Image: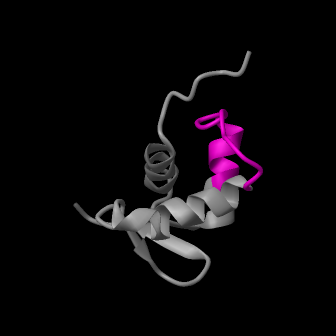
Amino acid sequence: MPMKNILSLHEAIVVALVNNCDRKATYAEIASFIEKRKLFTNRKGNILLEEQVRLRATLSSGGYKHLFEVINSETIKLRNI
């Protein structure tokens, strides 16, 4: 039986970013952090976690733009809120 996620994906992204002193990271670094700590294990579909992180941080109908700032095509930063 798959483990239930303790955090939602956007919460896991925030945890990953908070653990970097400058609060920014690439999508690959964030995905690696999340996988190593098993923060978001139960995923649907065949989308790579790195791509899910990118989609959640940049698209999601703008629902998470208050949390994340896009630095470049590979990197995001946690906004100061």
Q: Nearer the viewer, residue 68 or 46?
A: 46
Q: Is residue 80 above or below residue 71?
A: above
Q: Nearer the viewer, residue 24 or 13?
A: 13
- Looking at the rendering, the stretch of residues picked out in magenta corresponds to 31-47
Question: Could you tell me which quadrant the N terminus lies in?
Answer: top right
Point 43% across, 51% down: residue: 14
Residue occupying the far left of the picture? 81
Is residue 29 toward the left or the right of residue 79 in the image?
right
Residue occupying the far top of the picture? 1
Q: Quadrant of residue 26?
A: bottom right
The picture places residue 48, in percent across and down from the top left corner, at: 74, 55
Q: Nearer the viewer, residue 59 or 41?
A: 59
The picture places residue 28, in percent across and down from the top left corner, at: 69, 63
Is residue 39 toward the left or the right of residue 60 in the image?
right
The picture places residue 66, in percent across and down from the top left corner, at: 29, 64
Question: Could you tell me which quadrant the C terminus lies in?
Answer: bottom left
Q: Is residue 38 above or below residue 13?
A: above
Q: Quadrant of residue 68?
A: bottom left
Query: In this view of the protein, can residue 23 be seen by the observer?
Result: no
Is residue 24 toward the left or the right of residue 62 in the image?
right
Main SS class of the magenta portion in the image: loop
